[in-house]
Image (cartoon, rainbow, N blue to C red):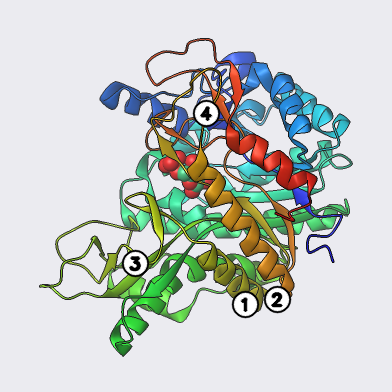
Amino acid sequence: MEIFSKKFLWGAAISAFQAEGAWQEDGKGSTAADLRCMENRRQSGIADTTVASDFYHRYREDIALMKACGLTSFRFSISWARLYPDNTGVLNQEGLNFYDKVVDELKANGIEPIVTLYHFDLPQWMIEEYRGFVSRKAIDAFLLYAHTCFTHFRSRVKYWLTINEEDVLANIPQFSGLKDPKESWQAYHHMNLANAQVMKLFHSLGTGGKIGPCISYCTVYPATPDPKDQLTAYEIEDIYSFSIMDVLMRGEYPCYLINRLREKGLLFETEPGDENLMKGAKPDFIGVNWYTTEVVGQYIEEKESFGNYEGPELPRRRRKEKGFAQYYQNPFTKYSNPEWNTDGVGFHLALRKLYERFHLPIIITENGLSCEQEVLTDGRVHDENRIEYLSEMVKAMAAAIRDGVEILSYNPWSFIDLVSSSQGMEKRYGLVYVNRTNENEKDLKRYPKDSYYWYQECIRRNGDI
Ligand code: BG6
């Protein structure tokens, strides 16, 4: 019997600022992500968003490669600043035209678009006018942009994702435009309201499509059977993954999160009606970015660990001498770099936990392995470790589906190599190699890696690998 249904979508993913380039073309405004990447380029020489992987000019060629691979879905994001480059509320038609062409090309090739509204690239004018999401007025700006997208693409785009990883966004000052953690938490609350309002708006339009949030999830194992390690691991998973999901999926701030924020003097302000608004937004599915697992235990000063968690305040994870918890490498899993393991069992467990908690279908919006210094030899990239990773993940999905978990689409990160938000082109995620380095844009030619051909066969066999 086939495990993956005939309707299962096999896809891949990218985001606008990491892949498009053309950062000032056709009226696009600049974004926090553009400026952050440029600063990174100045400081450490890594690639920025000016050209990135040039998806803006090569989308046809890339979509042809998707088709040849057998993809039936593609997750990408719209750049808010292409549509609304400034605060006048006037739509930049040329910006919209680009996404029209992308969507039409995908549909013509039988590929279902899965579109993220906001993936780390806050328009710079939002920061200048509203301090990002610190002001409630930012919510209206987001609604205007979302309304444009929903109505314009209503018959062509069925699946929408609201905001990619709100918690991560709020944690990275250059993405949020905020340095003060108190402001970041306030912005976080307003993003949650924006998320809820946008989902309500979408449902009120009756397009027949589906919408959900996009969260990151790292499965956590307790370091030992010591009850204190069990509790600490549970708390870390709750704080850094489930609290965020509970807010977005159920509209509730968990008590433990509120208590911790209050203790630290970081609790945000709310207004009457906020809770009802958040509870009233009913996502149709959950979008999940899942990569690795972690081993966590209580903080013991004399015990050697890989790093420490400081606690729930932003930024999310600080490697300080002392902390709230310690984390370790897992000797039972294989690591491709010191922080990235291949753990299919952890993925299976994650899918079970998600489904049991929310009883909603899941879209895997990101999942994959990054390689530093991946080399192109004779037009080929032999990325055996990525094949091993993806194959474990496909088997894990099959096991979860057998257990009753509903998965709609699998979208590994990423289809083409793109600008990693931390290491530019040095850290490659793609199924397709893009011929450029951090320093040299070269010819940007595409070369399908061995993993691309593996995935092609996996799709042809509908996951029966
Ligand atoms: C995800 C983001 O959290 O992590 C992606 O949604 C990002 O945009 C990915 O690329 C990997 O992180 P990095 O820092 O290697 O780009």
Mark pair 2, 4: CA separation: 35 Å
Q: Where is residue 387 drawn, in percent x and y?
A: 56, 45
- Does any atom of ligand 1 lie closer than 8 Å to the CB of label 3? no
Depth check, mark 2 against mark 3: the one in front is: 2
Depth check, mark 2 against mark 4: the one in front is: 4
Name the side, left or right, on which 241 lies relative to 137: left
Q: Earlier in the sequence, mark 1 or mark 4?
A: 1
State yes or no: discs 2 and 4 in contact (Cβ < 8 Å): no
Depth check, mark 1 against mark 3: the one in front is: 1
Mark pair 2, 3: CA separation: 33 Å
Q: What is the secondary structure assignment of the residue under circle 1?
A: helix
State yes or no: discs 1 and 4 in contact (Cβ < 8 Å): no
Q: Earlier in the sequence, mark 4 or mark 3?
A: 3
Residue drawn at point x = 50 percent, y = 25 percent? 30
Q: Is residue 434 above or below residue 119?
A: above
Give the residue pinned by disc 4.
Answer: 381
Q: What type is the residue that disc 3 sits on?
A: Pro
Q: What type is the residue that disc 2 sits on?
A: Asp
State yes or no: discs 2 and 3 in contact (Cβ < 8 Å): no
Residue 312: assigned label: 3
Residue 403: assigned label: 2
For the question of whether residue 77 can be seen, the reply is no
Question: Camera-side residue: 203 or 419?
Answer: 419
Mark pair 4, 3: CA separation: 40 Å
Q: Where is residue 364 drawn, in percent x and y?
A: 64, 55
Residue 357: assigned label: 1
Name the side, left or right, on which 357 lies relative to 383: right
Mark pair 1, 2: CA separation: 14 Å
Q: Residues within 10 Å of mark 3 (few under 14, many from 20)?
A: some
